[in-house]
Image (cartoon, grey):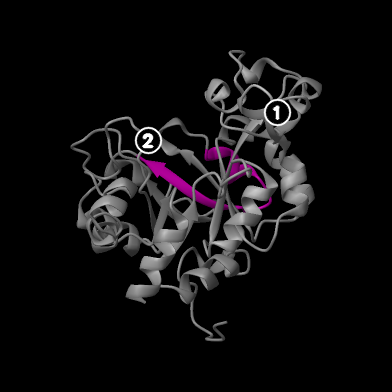
Amino acid sequence: MSTKTTAPRFGRERYADINIDLNRACDQSPFVIAAHRGTPRGDIRENTLNGVIATTKVNADIAEIDVIRSTDGEYFAFHDGTEMARLRITDDILSKTAAELDELRYTEYPGAYYGNVERVAHILSNAPDILINIDRSWRYWSTGFLDWLDQFHLERKLILKCPVAEGFQQALHDHETKYMFMGMIQSPDELDLFVGDEQINTVGVELVATTEDTPLADPAVFRTISEHGLYSFVNALDLGNGYCGLKGMDDTRSILEGPQHGWGALLTLGANVIQTDWPEKLDEYRRVIA
């Protein structure tokens, strides 16, 4: 554990006490590993407490969970839109009550079940000592989610994010608890929408590639983010949508051609945090280059 008394690496000085665990993780390694939807393996499903626990076992630093809200106001961990793939149902999960969501079980084929869809409260109340990236909760920030989140007193562990072009970050500006925030951008110009707001505890920027010729795959963009005192968070995920991360620097290329061609190329651009579906292999690479 680092005992150096230096200025915080990421985020404003006024929020240093909140950001201390994040900056400690950044100080301990050449880059930070974020596990996409936790670490689902075998009978362990994504967006579950066990998936978060498993993330600590593969030496990743951040576990991700997605958030949905029931029609009667309860929060669950699930990525809406994956109902058929994960639950084998065609219903819109956002149309269900909490009681109905409690009954949903993960399955891959008839007769095989791998636990229930879990409440966010269950995960946060029992999570191990790890940073957690809360995804897709921005839909609920202005209608109660942030107040609800305060009960867990986890501001040093939770990183919230949103697409900044839509203005959801205003709720963080207005909220008393200054959760760590990561702005999601699709173009460099969007940095101007949030980095100057001192009432938001911005610690990083997620670069979201939506086209094959994304303007974000430019070292100058990463330098600009660094100059603002923020980390650059990149996705190495191969989601099958044709974008292949930042111009092909993704998990698939890293596994099949060698980590230097995917993950290594992202680090060369200036990435500080890499989100991956292969945290074990990325950790192996991190150990090699450390």
Relative horizontal placement of residue 45, taking residue 27 as reference (left or right): right
Residue 259 appears at what percent x and percent y? Answer: 29, 59
Residue in view at x 54 percent, y 62 percent: 58
Relative horizontal placement of residue 70, taking residue 268 as reference (left or right): right
Q: Report which residue position mark 1 lands on.
A: 105
Q: Secondary structure at mark 1?
A: strand
Q: Report which residue position mark 2 lands on.
A: 239
Q: State the residue in front, 101 or 165.
A: 101
How many C-alpha atoms fall within 10 Å of the one at disc 2: few (<14), some, or many (≥20)?
Answer: some
* Magenta-highlighted residues: 169-185
The C terminus: image quadrant: bottom left
- Residue 182 part of the magenta-drawn span: yes
Q: Secondary structure at mark 2?
A: loop
Confirm whether residue 239 shows in the render. yes
Q: State the residue in front, 59 or 247.
A: 59
- Residue 267 part of the magenta-drawn span: no
Residue 277 appears at what percent x and percent y? Answer: 44, 48
Q: Is residue 8 above or below residue 108?
A: below
Residue at the front extreme? 111
Q: Is residue 145 above or below residue 73?
A: below
